[in-house]
Image (cartoon, grey):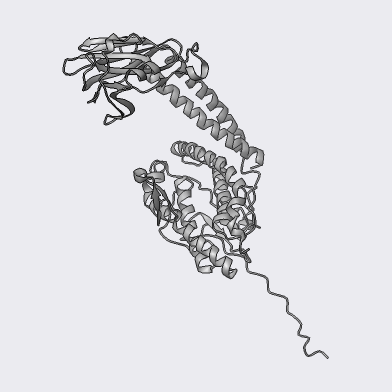
Amino acid sequence: MRPGKIVLAVFGALTALVALGLAIAGGALTWIHTTERDDDGYYMTSTERFETPTYALTSGHIDLGADVWGSDWEPLGDVTARIVAGSPGGGTVFIGIAPRADADRFLAVSAHDELTDVAFDPFEPTYRRHTGEAAPARPLDQRFWVASASGTGRQTLTWDIESGDWDVVIMNADAARGVVVDAAVGVKTGLLLPIGIGLLAGGLVLGAVAATMLYVALRNSGAGSGSPAPSDAAAGAPGAAAAGTAPVPEGAYPLRIDGRLDEPLSRWLWLVKWFLAIPHLLVLAFLWAAFMVLTVLAGFAILFTGRYPKGIFDFNVGVLRWTWRVTFYAFALGTDRYPPFSLQPDAGYPADLAVPYPATLSRGLVLVKWWLLALPHYLVVAVFGGTITWWAWGWGGDRGAFVGAGLIGILVLIAGVVLAVRGSYPRPVFDFVMGMERWTYRVWAYAALLRDEYPPFRLDNGGADPGAPPAAPSPPSAPTRDTSLVS
């Protein structure tokens, strides 16, 4: 693929992702509008129990944009809020909405609980306790409430929302300690359905744009690289395996990953290779976003046709190839040669990856192999790559922040230290790291639906993949003339 088509494929995949997000959001809002309104047109929460041994429950500060846009700005248009609350014991309850400054001043010296978070399923509110010794005045005697309701039984407060900083306060009407209420909150607005329909329409339009971009980028994408002639495939020419013409040796996995230890290596360059690879990592972030989107599209294609779209296949294999070259350079430390910015095979670079194109794929396996069947391999690969850490330390108490390293990282770090001291990469370490990388990339290829063959549970150590075509024999060296007896 030419660079322009690569960029178009990435933008097409990202546009498809945005389109999907818009469509999901629009569908959710439309569903809420049609199923979650009550008879009065309010979108209500479920009724839940709130209680405190203090004098009051407050919502905390509700900022509706006055600090940024000014008091005359109406951030939500014509929106009405409703709070329904009642004391399960039959007591008299008070519900009020007040400007933040007035509510803070009213409860400044009185103990109260501020609602800071709510968890659902199961329902569990979280409060922040504000201490105080004095009892507050009766809330009904105050004149700063912009909306209020009080009485026995279920009380309903209705408020036309306006900009400002507000607090919701729930108390016993006599200002006594111990507030227990069953409450629900809701809003009524005419904006939800138009927003939902607009998001759905935007998602459909962007989806059509994304489909067009991907079609233009991926059609005939393999034609530019050219399919090697049968003689090339037999000789193991670069690109033969990727094009699907090279036979896979019996017992080998149909993913070839090679890495030639490119000695001599610099003693100290390995310390900054990760930094030098940042341009590649930035590009790969976009390529992998496209990779994931295109893999989902390929999954649907396999489900209905039994074939992996060739253009998407070539692109995804190219992303794996690019990733492997950067990994080999910056994180396996196998070469000092900077990797090319390319999806294509490169016979001159000491690291390469290829996957033969499958004629057909199982329609049923596409539903389970990427998550269920690959799960045992994910556990192994997690140990290799560091998702499961070999050592870890934490800070922040129970927050559980950890730092760790996988087996590959540990061994490469050891190899880097040995390289700095002795000037050579330990060959046994290199071979073992290659085996773990080979296992990892086979699992990636399987999970990305590129092949149906289940990855083997084995380490094929060494730089040359057992699935690679045998290298052509080296030509015999020209005889050298011994001149030591020539007089």
Q: Is residue 386 visible?
A: yes
Q: Farthest residue toward the right? A: 487
Q: Residue furthest left?
A: 89
Q: Nearer the viewer, residue 123 or 39?
A: 123
Quadrant in the picture for residue 153? top left
In the visual, does 323 lie left or right of 382? right
Q: Position of residue 236 (x, y in %)?
A: 60, 59
Q: Nearer the viewer, residue 9 or 466?
A: 9
Residue shown at the point (51%, 15%) measured from the top left: 70
User: As displayed, is residue 445 above or below residue 53?
Assistant: below
Asked whether residue 462 is in view, the answer is no
Q: Tell me which residue sits at (52%, 17%) in the image.
A: 69
Q: Note whether 88 is above or below 281 in the view shown.
A: above
Whole-percent x, y for residue 53 in the image: 22, 26
Report the front residue among 20 and 164: 164
Where is the N terminus found, in terms of image quarters?
top right
Query: As displayed, is residue 205 above or below residue 473?
Result: above
**Residue 190: where, in percent of width, then height?**
42, 11
The answer to which image quadrant residue 188 occupies is: top left
Q: Position of residue 372 (x, y in %)?
A: 36, 45
Work out whether residue 322 or residue 208 is closer to the camera in this orientation and state it. 322
Q: Quadrant of the C terminus?
A: bottom right
Q: Quadrant of residue 391?
A: bottom left
Q: How many callouts does the rendering have?
A: 0
